[in-house]
Image (tube, helix red, strand yellow):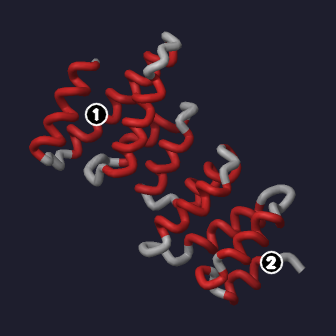
Amino acid sequence: TTLAILFIHNLIASEEIGNPVLHNKLVILLLQFYMHLCAMEAPQHDNVRKQLFQFLRYSKHYVARELAPHFKSTELHEEYAVILARMGRHRDALKIYTHTLKSHKHAREYCEMVYPQNPDIFVMLLETYLQENPPNISQAVQLLQNHPSKLPPEAALEMLPE
């Protein structure tokens, strides 16, 4: 597995190959290697996870819908959120950041990253906070205070509880 990972990684890097099959294969190999290292309780698993996360975040050539099932039932929630984002499933990605990871900082960073391509992303985050049970009013207020220019007033007012 390690040799295959090195070979594909070097091939992609040196040739700047955009072949989705190779990119998907590298992701699967990294995922399998990570799982193997975790099962062995090997300390290198964190490095492999970082490599996997970086590749998912920056590669433009893998096919997210083909990889999503491999991540759905793992503890690799942040990696799964990146894949969901690539598929345009922003609400699902935000739920992972806010509900599963409980990282509002990552949720806001995600919104900042996505905002140029999808100006509705902050509205989706506000909606995510307000649809929690109970609604996460403190995070909603913080979002409204820190990003007023990125939340259309009509949409925000329509969602706010009375």
- Horizontal side of 92 relative to 87 (left or right) equals right
Which numbered disc covers residue 26?
1
Mark 1 and mark 2: span between their CA atoms? 44 Å
Residue type pointed to by label 2: Leu
The residue lying at 65 percent from left, 44 percent from top is 101
**Residue most extreme to the left:** 15
Q: How many marks?
A: 2
- Horizontal side of 121 relative to 88 (left or right) equals right
The residue lying at 42 percent from left, 29 percent from top is 47
Residues under numbered marks 1 and 2 in contact, where contact means CB atoms less than 8 Å apart: no
Residue type pointed to by label 1: Leu
Q: Image height check: is 69 above or below 40? A: below
Q: Position of residue 153 (x, y in %)?
A: 69, 88
Q: Image height check: is 113 above or below 56? A: below
Q: Image height check: is 100 above or below 123? A: above
Q: Which residue is mark 2?
A: 160
The secondary element bearing badge 2 is classed as: loop
State which quadrant residue 37 falls in: top left
Mark 1 burial class by Cα count in 10 Å: few <14, some 14-19, many 20+ = many
Q: Image height check: is 155 above or below 36? A: below
Nearest the viewer among 71 and 47 is 47
